[in-house]
Amino acid sequence: MSAGDRTLGRVTVLGGARGGKYPHGNSLLVAGTEERVIVDPSLSLVDRADLPAADRILNSHCHEDHVAGNHRYPDAACHLHELDLPGLRSLDDFMAIYGMSDAIDRAFRRTVVEDFHFVPRPDALPFRDGAVFDLGRCRIRVLHAPGHTRGHSLFHVEPDDVLYLGDIDLSSFGPYYGDAWSSLADFVRTLAMAAGLRARWYATFHHVGVLEGRAAFRERLARFAAVIDDREARLLAFLAAPRTLAEIVAHRFVYRPGDAVLFADDVERRSMRQHLDRLAAAGRVREVEPGRFRASG
Ligand SMILES: [Zn+2]
C-alpha cells in the first residue's frame, strides 16, 4: 500500500499521481481468493516500486492513459471489450481509434510510445456486456457503456458493491466524445443508463476519485451530463450568425480558447460536428449556404 491508496473491501484503489488528474489515473486492484485483477493500469504504476501482482488486466477502454501500465504485467491475461480490442493489436490500430489529422497523428504517436509506454497486446481477449470474472468470493461484472469509445465498459465488483466508471469521470470538463471511435448519441444513452445504476461506491479513473452513495453519484452525474447541454446552448448562441465549421472550431466549445492541447482542433471539429448534426436533425440549425450553419427561428 502507498499513501494515496484506499481499501474498499476486496478492492484497493491505487491512487494516481496528481490525484489521478490526466495523464495519471486511479487503477483498481481486485483481490479474490483465487485471482487478482488489475483494472486500467495507469501511468502512475509505471515506476511504482511496490507494484501489486495481478493475474489479469481488465481495460475499461483503449485510450493511452488507461493502458499505460499494461506492460508492467506482461504475463497477465489482458481483457477488454470486443469493440475496443482491435486497438491493442498494433500502434497503427491504436491510433485509428483517435482518427487524428496527419500532423497531429505523427506528434501524438510519439507521445503514446514515449510518454505512455504503449506496447501492443495482440494476445488480448475480448469480453462483452454481462461478462463475469469470478475471482473467488468476489466477482467483476462488465457493463458496456459506449460513447467515449465504442467498447468503453464499466465494472461492478461484488460483494463489495464498487462500481468502476472508467472515463465517465464526473469531472467539470464533462463527457469526451471527440475521437473517431466516440459517439455523442451513444454517450447520451449511456449517461441515462448510468443514472439508474445502484452501488455503494462509485470509482472514477481521474481526479474526482471515489464517491460514496447514490445521491452523491447522481448529483455529480447530472452536472457532468449538463456539460453536453451547455456546449450545445453555447453553439446555438454562436450560430445566431451563419458560421462555418472552421469558425466553430476556432471559437472553442470543448476546450477553453487558451488551452494548449495538441489535438484540440481535431477534438473540437469532431465533437461540434456531432452537435451540428443533432441540431440539424431536430430542425434547430440549418445549412443556409454550403458549409455555413445558422440557428433556425
Ligand atoms: Zn478515455
Image (spheres, helix red, strand yellow):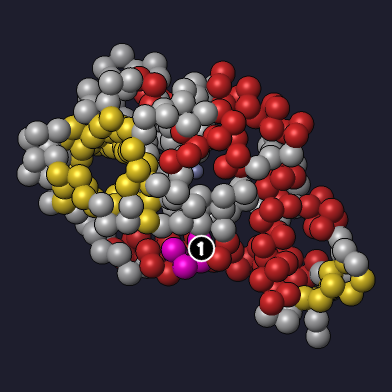
Look at the image and tell me whether residue 146 can be seen. Answer: yes
Q: Which residue is mark 1?
A: 186
Which of the two residues, 93 or 47, is positioned nearer the viewer here? 93
Question: Image point 35% across, 60% down: which residue?
Answer: 217
Q: Position of residue 165 (x, y in %)?
A: 37, 51
Q: Position of residue 224 (x, y in %)?
A: 49, 60
Question: Image point 68% across, 65% down: which residue?
Answer: 275
Residue 91: name its quadrant: top right
Question: Image point 31% across, 14% down: which residue?
Answer: 49
**Magenta segment boundaries in residue numbering:** 187-191
Which of the two residues, 233 or 105, is positioned nearer the viewer here? 105
**Residue 8 is inside the magenta segment:** no
Give the residue furthest to the top: 49
**Position above or below: 231 against 58:** below
Q: From the image, which quarter does the C terminus lie in?
A: bottom right
Q: Main secondary structure of the magenta part?
A: helix
Say what secondary structure mark 1 lies in: helix
Q: Please give left or right for residue 120 compared with residue 263 in the image.
A: left
Q: Is mark 1 within 8 Å of ligand 1?
A: no
Q: Amino acid at mark 1?
A: Asp
Q: From the image, which quarter does the N terminus lie in?
A: top left
Residue 105: name its quadrant: top right
